[in-house]
Each structure stands twice: as structure tokens, then as C-alpha cells.
Amino acid sequence: MSCRLKKLKIGTLNCTSVYTVQRRRQLYNVFKQINPDIMLLQETWLKENNILNFPKYSSCRSHANGFHLGTAIFTRNTIVSEQIQIPGVSLIETTAAAIKLQNNMRLLVVSIYIPHTVSIPELLRDLDAVKNETTEYDACIIGGDFNARSLSWDDASTCRGVNLEKWTSENADLFCHLVPSEPTFPRSGSRLDHFIISNELFSSGLSIKVEPSFSTHNSVTLNLELDSTFVPLAQAPPMFRDYRGVDWTGFRGEMEDELSLLDIEINRNLSPVEIDKSIESLTTIIQ
């Protein structure tokens, strides 16, 4: 299937936990409100055994543990993407995905969370590791909670904010640092949630929207207008089969006839090898 996206909508939200069913429903309402092509999440608080799925989206996650709070990326299931690991990043929390573009090009998308506990040398080291990874791609979008404040974006100044601003200025030949004009953390009136994108993705049609959410953070949506160079490669959404018209009585009859030919002993416990062979035979019959 070949279709082109002229616009790309990327959202980011520090969830401050979607551990409970109620919080996940609230997050899904944010998805329905924003209708993003890509959604970046931070502070999910979800461990590996916790499930978080939404209709029409594929996801990849970095799980919460004793050190990290959990990040995630959701992409429309019509977009071809796969999770990748960024070498050299240890204290900044990231989930990264490679998105296939037209003409065999690739877009790197990163959901990022910078904890308060990260020192400035550690921050700069991990940011450089992310920058090094971007060189393997044709463009990048980095978004999330940077926990950074600076007078440059009408906020109180912190060391983290000053150093983030310095880092983006030093790499201005590669990236454009996008800070919303409205607070993203209403409690303190701060702009903590930002985007950093490749200069190639910047256009006059770019816009940023901040909206209230169930979290202590507001959601931030970045709207990009893409030229044909950076259009994501699209795939057909997963197919769903409708079994309502199946002749189940006939199916059962065929299964009973086939099963009668299988040599499965039912008067004793089977070994693991025998069980595996029986399952393989049954699978072949069903297929």
C-alpha cells in the first residue's frame, strides 16, 4: 500500500503514572483528543509485566525499575517503525524508534525524560550520545520532559536549563530547539516539555499546541508540514478477520475427522516432546 502523509502530528506528555486502569482511560482520552501520528510518553511508571495498548497504534517502551520511571512511544499502525537502543545513554531515560521514510530514508524519534538527579556532566554526556545516534538517520525528533528552565524561554533559570540551552546553541547547525510559548507544568508556570528536531524538518507551517491533561503536565503537540523527502513510509493497517459467517458446525466435523487420525494417547501423561509434537500436528490441521 502506498499513501503519503503531508503532515505529521507528534504529541508528548509526562503522564505522572498510567499504572491504574483509570489513568490509562484518561490517557486514551488524550489520544482521542490530540489524534497524534506519534505520541511520546514519560513517567509511565509501568513495569515489564504491565500492559498498555491502544487501538490503531503500535508501541515500544522502556520499563520502569528502581532507577527509571518509564518512557514510551506510540505510532499509528500505518507507520512502519521499530524500537532501537541508543548506545551510551545511561542516566537520561529514553525510548527510541526508527521510522521508515520514503526512498529508504529513516527518521529517529526519541521520547526523553531527564530526571532531577542527573548531574550536568552526566546530562551533557548522554545528550551527546543521543546526538551521535542521530548521525545514523536522515532526520530526528526528540521530545519529552527535559526538566529544564531558562530565562531565554521566560522561565526561572536553572543549571540544567542553562546547559541545555548552551548545548542546543552549540549544535544549532544540526537541531532546532522548540519550547512552547505556554507553560507545560502549570503548578509552577514552567515550560519543562520541549521538542528538539532536525533543522531539515523545520518549516513555516510548524506549530505547537499546549493543552490541559489529567496529569500534572500539559500535553504538547507539534504539527509538522513535511515535504516529500521526509514523508513516512506507510503500510496497510493490520487485517482483522470476521468469523461471524463461518460454518462452525462444518468446521467441528472436519476437525473431529482429522483428530481421529492423530495417534495421541489419552490414558497417560505425555512427555513435553510428545505434547509439542501433538500441538504441531493440531496447528497444521487448523491451518
Image (spheres, grey):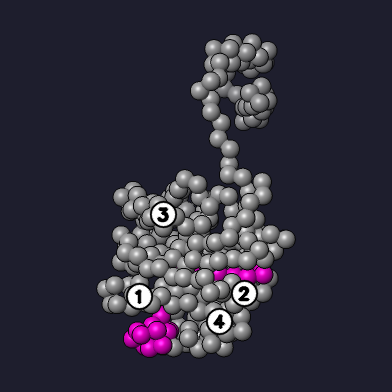
* Residue 25 as seen in the image, left or right of residue 72: left
- What segment is highlighted magenta in the picture? 137-161
x 59%, y 57%: residue: 5
Tags 3 and 4 in contact by the CB under 8 Å rule? no
Q: Quadrant of residue 160?
A: bottom left
Callout 1: SS: loop
Spot occupied by residue 212 in the image (x, y as percentages of width and height)? 32, 64
The amino acid type, in three-letter code, at marker 3 is: Phe
The amino acid type, in three-letter code, at marker 2 is: Glu
Spot occupied by residue 219 in the image (x, y as percentages of width and height)? 38, 65
Name the outermost residue toward the left: 187
Mark 2 or mark 1, earlier in chain: 1
Spot occupied by residue 63 in the image (x, y as percentages of width and height)? 47, 59
**Label 2 vs label 1: CA separation?**
25 Å
**Label 2 vs label 4: CA separation?**
24 Å
The amino acid type, in three-letter code, at marker 1 is: Glu
The amino acid type, in three-letter code, at marker 4 is: Arg
Mark 3 or mark 2, earlier in chain: 3
Q: Nearer the viewer, residue 199 or 252?
A: 199
Q: Quadrant of residue 280?
A: top right
x 34%, y 67%: residue: 217
**Label 3 vs label 2: CA separation?**
27 Å
x 31%, y 50%: residue: 22
Q: Which residue is mark 3?
A: 31
Q: Nearer the viewer, mark 3 or mark 2?
A: 2
Mark sitting on residue 182: 1
Callout 2: SS: helix
Mark 3 or mark 1, earlier in chain: 3
Q: Which residue is mark 2?
A: 200
